[in-house]
Image: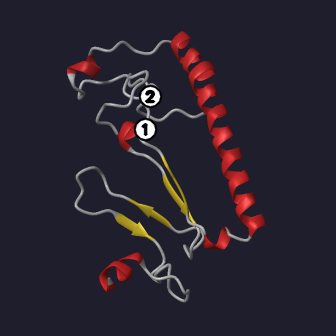
Amino acid sequence: MPKPPSFDEADVSDKPAGVRNRPRIGAAAQARMRNVVLKGRLESLLSVDEAAGAIVAALRESGELANTLIVFTSDNGWMQGEHRIRNGKTVPYEESIRVPLIMRGLGLPAGCSLTVGPPRSPHGSMNIPASRPYAGTDRQDPQERSAAA
């Protein structure tokens, strides 16, 4: 897998002491990370992918797929050598704080996406169709539903 520019950074002079004092990640450690940790994570992800596929197939077979909103997310990112941090999730770097949020169904247009701005940004940037996902369906927008209550 390709490594991001932040992987095992050569110049960490702009980083806090906790990062500046970390040694570079040698070839042996990189090989362990790649062969053990990454391989294990990819195998786990394959299991998640297979399970999601089975759930979608069951929903399709039961006729409920069109009536179902599927949401996938994670609790945190995980460092894998970025900024010389071999592992962990409690550091204030993009690799640790960014998590996926994937939604499918209930009138959401295929291929729409949303990109949230940087941390502490007052707003994000959006790349979604102008029409509301519930337009033209018998489903009520959750905000309208709560406002009507």
Q: Secondary structure at mark 1?
A: loop
Q: Nearer the viewer, residue 75 or 81?
A: 75
Residue 15 position by quadrant? top left
- Residue 7: which numbered mark, if any? 2
How crowded pointer 2 is (Cα within 10 Å; few <14, some 14-19, many 20+) is rated as some
Instruction: Check whether the beta carbons of the residues at disc 2 and disc 1 lie within 8 A of each other.
Output: no
Give the residue type at disc 1.
Answer: Gly
Which residue is more in the foreground, 61 or 36? 61
Which residue is disc 1 drawn over?
A: 77
Residue depicted at x 74% and y 59%: 58
Is residue 119 shown left or right of residue 8?
left
- Give whichever of 10, 128 is nearer the camera: 128
User: Going 46% across and 72% down the picture, which residue do you hit?
Assistant: 128
Picture quarter containing residue 147?
A: bottom left
What colour-coding does the image apply?
secondary structure
Look at the image and tell me in which quarter the C terminus lies: bottom left
Q: Quadrant of the N terminus?
A: top right
Amino acid, disc 2:
Phe
**Percent from the top left, x then y, of residue 11?**
32, 24
Residue plotted at (36% across, 12% down): 23
Total numbered labels: 2
Give how far apart the Cα atoms at labels 2 and 1 are: 15 Å
Question: 33 or 104: nearer the eye?
Answer: 104
Residue 102, disc? none
84 left or right of 103? left
Q: Position of residue 29 (x, y in %)?
A: 52, 13
